[in-house]
Amino acid sequence: MKREELLAWVGGHVSAKAVFAVLKEDGPSKEYYSISLCVPSLDGIVYERLMHVNHNGTIIEGDGWQISGRAAVRGFLREVWKYLTPTFRAQANAALREHKEKNART
């Protein structure tokens, strides 16, 4: 599969299945908020293609694939941005904004 085909496939799959999580965490000195992009799937080809896009992320046994941390999430989204649906782009922007705003208040 050519790189552009891979990005288009992953962008479509992510747009259809992925969800964002902005969660409160306990740090060593204060609370903070983390951000993750999660793609539920049990299909090995999905994992392989997601990992191939930017060689990042974690396979969560029996649950899906996840990428965590603002820089990692943004880097992944940057790779597939033009292949994401407008609705998912809006969700991504909202999740990143929520993450930034919550961390600004802690």
Image: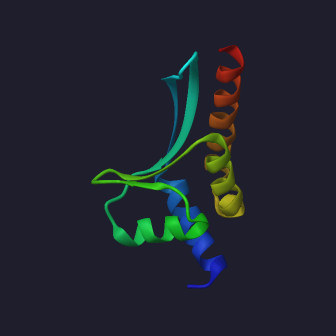
Give above or below for 65 relative to 52.
Answer: above
Residue visible at 63% across and 56% down?
Answer: 76
Q: Position of residue 5 (x, y in %)?
A: 61, 78
Which quarter of the image is occupied by the N terminus?
Answer: bottom right
Q: Position of residue 85 (x, y in %)?
A: 63, 56
* Residue 30 or residue 94, whichever sits in front: 30
In the visual, does 58 lie left or right of 85? left
* Residue 29 or residue 96, whichever sits in front: 29
The image quadrant that residue 33 belongs to is top right
In the visual, does 42 lie left or right of 100? left
Q: Position of residue 25 (x, y in %)?
A: 50, 24
Q: How many marks?
A: 0
Give above or below for 30 relative to 92.
Answer: above
Residue visible at 55% across and 66% down?
Answer: 10
Q: Position of residue 104 (x, y in %)?
A: 72, 20
| Residue that lies at the very extreme toward the left in this rendered image | 62
